[in-house]
Amino acid sequence: MYRLYGMSGSGNCYKPKLLLTQMGVPFAWIEKDTRKAETRTPEYLAMNANGKVPLLEITPGQYLAESNAILCYLAEGTPYLPQDRWQRAHVMQWLFFEQYSHEPYLAVARFIMKFLPPDDARRADLPRLHARGHQALAVMERQLTEHAFFAGGQYSIADIALYAYTHVADEGGFDLSRYSKVRGWLERVHAQSGHVGMA
């Protein structure tokens, strides 16, 4: 059985949890709170020297870090990752977009607003994060104007990756009312078989 080390409430940890649940694959969830330095212990660092979650233990002593790498590993050979070379590249394109143009803004703004005190100095960065986050949301809106899902013509790990922080974007101060296509897509993802919410 897979063992998934993660922190409840983290979108990056939610991604593999959602995929495993939708695939009907049993797994054990091991809670690790990064705010309490639970991923900085010698025992955890021996499993993942980067000291972050999520971390997938495939077999004893075999570990895989980074949320989107875990998604690719788990989805291999399933409809969640197309076999066609072109469609597969499109999935990868959106996975990279999520990590470089989306998550650094939506997720960080959410962290600041949800987990840091109102007088924290990092709140000064919110205008920049919101501006860049809205740029990413606008890109998503354009893609969804002609497509029900992001890649391969069907629901895939590209959707799971982008859904994780988009569906809680309001917690980071993002108003999605102007993005009708994104909101429709969120509803379609929520309606997928085996969907579970972020704890």
Image (cartoon, rainbow, N blue to C red):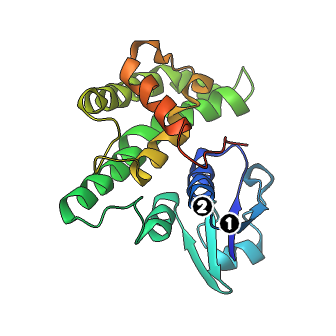
Q: Is residue 96 left or right of residue 191?
A: left
Measuring 43% from the left and 45% from the top, which residue is drawn there?
159
Q: Mark 2 or mark 1: which comes first in sequence?
A: 1
Alpha carbon separation for disc pair 2 and 1: 10 Å
Q: Is residue 56 above or below residue 37?
A: below
What is the three-letter code of the residue carrying label 1?
Leu
Q: Is residue 9 above or below residue 77?
A: above
Give the image quarter of residue 3: bottom right
Q: Is residue 178 above or below residue 184?
A: above
Indicate the position of residue 46 as horizontal and vertical percent values. 68, 79
Residue situated in front as seen by the camera: 62 or 181: 181
Indicate the position of residue 148 as horizontal and vertical percent values. 33, 35
What is the three-letter code of the residue carrying label 2?
Leu
Instruction: Name the residue at the top extreme.
Output: 177
Residue situated in front as seen by the camera: 51 or 76: 76
- Please identify the quadrant where the C terminus is shown: top right
Q: Is residue 82 above or below residue 42?
A: above
Q: Which mark is residue 113?
A: none
Residue situated in front as seen by the camera: 32 or 93: 93
Neighbor class of circle 2 (other Cα within 10 Å; few <14, some 14-19, many 20+) is some
Mark 2–mark 1 CB contact (< 8 Å): yes
Instruction: Report which residue position mark 1 lands on.
Output: 4
Neighbor class of circle 1 (other Cα within 10 Å; few <14, some 14-19, many 20+) is many
Q: Secondary structure under badge 2?
A: helix
Indicate the position of residue 44 as horizontal and vertical percent values. 72, 72
Indicate the position of residue 99 as horizontal and vertical percent values. 42, 48
Q: Which mark is residue 20?
A: 2
Residue situated in front as seen by the camera: 186 or 97: 186
Measuring 40% from the left and 52% from the top, which residue is drawn there?
156
Give the image quarter of residue 53: bottom right
Q: Is residue 120 left or right of residue 160?
A: right
